[in-house]
Image (cartoon, rainbow, N blue to C red):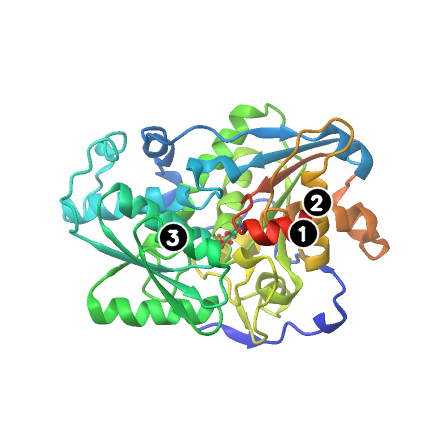
Amino acid sequence: MTARGRSGNFSCMTPRYVINPFCRQSPDWPSSITEEFRDCRAGIVHRSMAHYSETPLVPLDGLALELGAGRLMVKDESYRFGLNAFKALGSAYAMYKFITRQLSGGSSADKRAGQFYLNPPIEPGEFTFCTATDGNHGRGVAWVARLLKQKAIIYLPEETAPSRIENIKAEGAEVIAVSGSYDSAVDRCREDAERNGWSIIADTGWTGYEQIPRWIQAGYLTMFEEVQRQWSERPDVVFIQSGVGALAATAAWYYHRAYPEPPPKLICVEPLTADCCLQSIKSEEGEPMTIDDNPSSIMAGLNCGTPSPVAWPFIKQGYAMFAAITDRAGREAMRTFYHPKGGDPRIVSGESGAAGLAALMTIMSDPAFKDAREFLKLDKDSRVLLINTEGDTDPEGFRVIVG
Ligand SMILES: Cc1ncc(COP(=O)(O)O)c(C=O)c1O
């Protein structure tokens, strides 16, 4: 159970930040929760997939100069698997782990890591996979299910942009629209899966459901391993946008391991109207909180009311700062990516994809963030990493925003 609390104060739509009192330079994560990261072989699984190639890491020198940062690099996940978002990294690895475990009666089956997608060891239609999503994770699960010739049922909030629904249907999945928020879609998916014996591939967890979200988090490691191959320097500040926090958890584990002394400063970025991680870190014990207000940002992938309890221990000790940003800043960041200055390359970034840049621009320009800027030592010497987690996954909305 998570505590409940009001996000509050967003009626005035002022961006805000919290410096994390629980952050540790050397987190004491128990080995029981780090095992899947430590033993992860997602890179081998992903590299064996026909659609795999490294996504670009793009330097934006002109924008860095304009903002007053030293070096600005953007990992562009809009190129991931031709799916326009990073999410299938998680489902491809988790579904490989899930199926091989089922087939081997629980033993580790990593010997097949590089073979699994070349020659899937299951008959068509053996499994029915389901999940709840704001769009991108569901498309990832549906895509992997199609590769494996299995059935997928995807639950979405009924307000989901039509193009995101169509993309999931195009993978051959059944789509169920649920009234209410993403969190209502999770509840409905759980109920139906239990009744029908379907296999849930969720990126968030709950009591008794932890293994699959851990595999999903491990699957995202591939992205950060690619960054390290592409950029020999250590980033000083890394912005990670968060919905349920699975990606944020992976970044925490990765950067505290890759550069322990000291790790880069990690910033968890959320929309003002769905700032469940910021509210959780502000609570007395720093434990996961459910925000009561209906998350309603344009950043659909980040519209979550509760951090995943599987992700939370990594976020709690791993992040230096939490920032909640406005939709307006998100739109401006999308336009900045799309209409570059100073000879920078163009980046197509969707509402959730641009959240990291929106936070960086807010921190660098808003007088209320002066102390945050100083705390992060963001200046002309800093090396900053952003993740463009999605491209134009809602092309109509994208056109309206970028013009
Ligand atoms: C484009 C995009 N970025 C970021 C996120 C946040 O990821 P997580 O839910 O793992 O925090 C999502 C989640 O769906 C997403 O779709």
Quarter of image, res 325: bottom right
Q: Are marks 2 and 1 in contact (CB under 8 Å)?
A: yes
For disc 3, the neighbor class at 10 Å (few under 14, some 14 to 19, many from 20) is many
- Amino acid type, mark 3: Ile
Q: Position of residue 403 (x, y in %)?
A: 69, 47
Q: Is mark 2 within 8 Å of ligand 1?
A: no
Mark 3 or mark 1, which has the lower sequence index? 3
User: What residue lies at 61% left-to-right and 50% top-to-bottom?
Assistant: 398
Q: Position of residue 204 (x, y in %)?
A: 42, 59
- Amino acid type, mark 1: Ile
266 displayed left or right of 85: right
Circle 1 is placed at which residue position?
401
For disc 2, the neighbor class at 10 Å (few under 14, some 14 to 19, many from 20) is many
Secondary structure type for disc 1: helix
Could you tell me how far apart the alpha carbons at marks 3 and 1 are, in whole angstroms? 23 Å
Q: Is mark 3 within 8 Å of ligand 1?
A: no
Asked whether the viewer can see residue 351, the reply is no
Q: Position of residue 18 (x, y in %)?
A: 70, 59
Secondary structure type for disc 2: helix
For disc 1, the neighbor class at 10 Å (few under 14, some 14 to 19, many from 20) is some
100 displayed left or right of 144: left
User: What residue lies at 52% left-to-right and 38% top-to-bottom?
Assistant: 77
Q: Is mark 1 within 8 Å of ligand 1?
A: no
Observer-nearest residue: 12 or 368? 12
- Amino acid type, mark 2: Arg
Secondary structure type for disc 3: helix
Indicate the quadrant containing the N terminus: top left, top right, bottom left or bottom right: bottom left
Observer-nearest residue: 227 or 137? 137
Mark 2 or mark 1, which has the lower sequence index? 2
User: What residue lies at 21% left-to-right and 43% top-to-bottom?
Assistant: 100
Mark 2 or mark 3, which has the lower sequence index? 3
Circle 2 is placed at which residue position?
335
